[in-house]
Amino acid sequence: MALQADNILDLVTTTQKELGRLKWTDLTTDLQEFIFLPKILKKEKVQFGSGYGIQWNVMTDFNKNARHVGLFAKDVINVADSMRIASIPWRHCTVAYAIDRREIAMNRDPAKIVDIVRNRRIQGMIDLATEIEKAGWSMPPSTTDDLMPYGLDYWITAYGASSTGAFAGGVPASGWTTVAGITPSSSTRWYNWCATYTSVSKSDLIKKMREGAAKTFFTPPVEISDYNRGDRYVWYTNYATLARMEELLEAQNDNLGRDVASMDGQVRFRKAPVQWAPYLDSLSASASKNPVIGVNWGQFYPVFLKGEYLVEAAQKPAPEQHTVLFTTIDLTWNLVCKDKRRHMRFENP
């Protein structure tokens, strides 16, 4: 057997290994990508200066006074009750990380390999990102829940979907009667487009997506001040569905070259990216339905209370642990959908 450095006792006793100082490999999460924390950290977020909740106005009707008339016709004046108020509450998220001050004393140069305070903070941020991702894709567990934010499953639903496709995605599940305080109905038009499908094919899913995309594109007939922040669509789905779409894309391209996976990461629908959302694979109920969700980030976005956006408090002693210092990070936020009709959801039940 060859002699190696590990076998020389004096060398092992007197010499450190290469320690990879101030770096480490992150294996903390099973999710390949997070969708919602980047939206909160970057341009999609909107802040509100005050108020105990979030409220906005929805116009659902008009007066219907317009008509063609003859000379000296009498006026007909109708006044419609056209305005409704949508509202959602704030939700509060928090995370904390702690360190004993003696750990700090030990974790200093020249013995320091990794900055332990920085490492604990990053652990806290990963913890927060995981909680926000869970909330972003889900919905409150019941109508009486007062903790969970109103995630994507609350706003963009396939509950009530048919195979033909329609504006039928109203309440998120059985037992719910309103969404943001508005009852979905033919008069409120408080629905998202939804449909069921059986195969990821041009004749089934893609055909229904095309119809949904056309029928959810609304242009007001007159210029108004609305909440639209510009149509910015992204399609989210689980991996199995995305892989089938990539196969479809390969099948329609006659010049793929030598790359056996040339279409991976290239799928787009009506010029909008189709993106894998790893969290959908972690939800067995959702993954089994192979959802395809068209999100318009111009109408659906995170909101937060001004002054309560990822507030990181100064270190302070922990109760009954006088040598322990802890730090909290807090966020007051929720997810708001200003117009349900601009969104789509397709599922294979």
Image (spheres, helix red, strand yellow):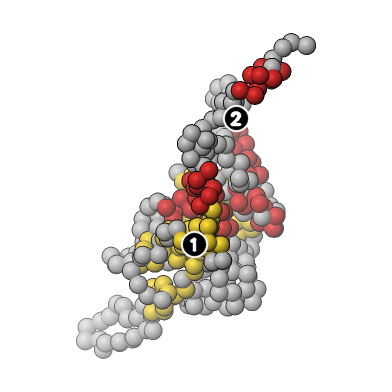
Q: From the viewer's perspective, is 147 left or right of 226?
A: right
Helix or strand or loop: what does disc 2 sit on? Answer: loop
Depth check: give the residue in front, 200 or 259.
259
Q: Does 129 sit above or below residue 173?
A: above
Question: In the rendered view of the protein, which quadrant contains the C terminus?
Answer: bottom right
Name the residue carrying label 2.
261
Q: Does 125 sit above or below residue 171?
A: above
Q: Are marks 2 and 1 in contact (CB under 8 Å)?
A: no
- Quarter assignment of residue 262: top right
Tell me the residue at 56%/58% (across/down): 131
Residue kind at label 1, given as amino acid type: Pro
Residue kind at label 2, given as amino acid type: Ala
Helix or strand or loop: what does disc 1 sit on? Answer: strand
Q: Which mark is first along the chain, 1 or 2?
A: 2
- Which x, y percent locates residue 311? 41, 60
Question: In the rendered view of the protein, which quadrant contains the N terminus?
Answer: top right
Q: From the viewer's perspective, is 186 left or right of 44?
A: right
The circle on residue 317 is: 1
- Which x, y percent locates residue 204? 63, 50
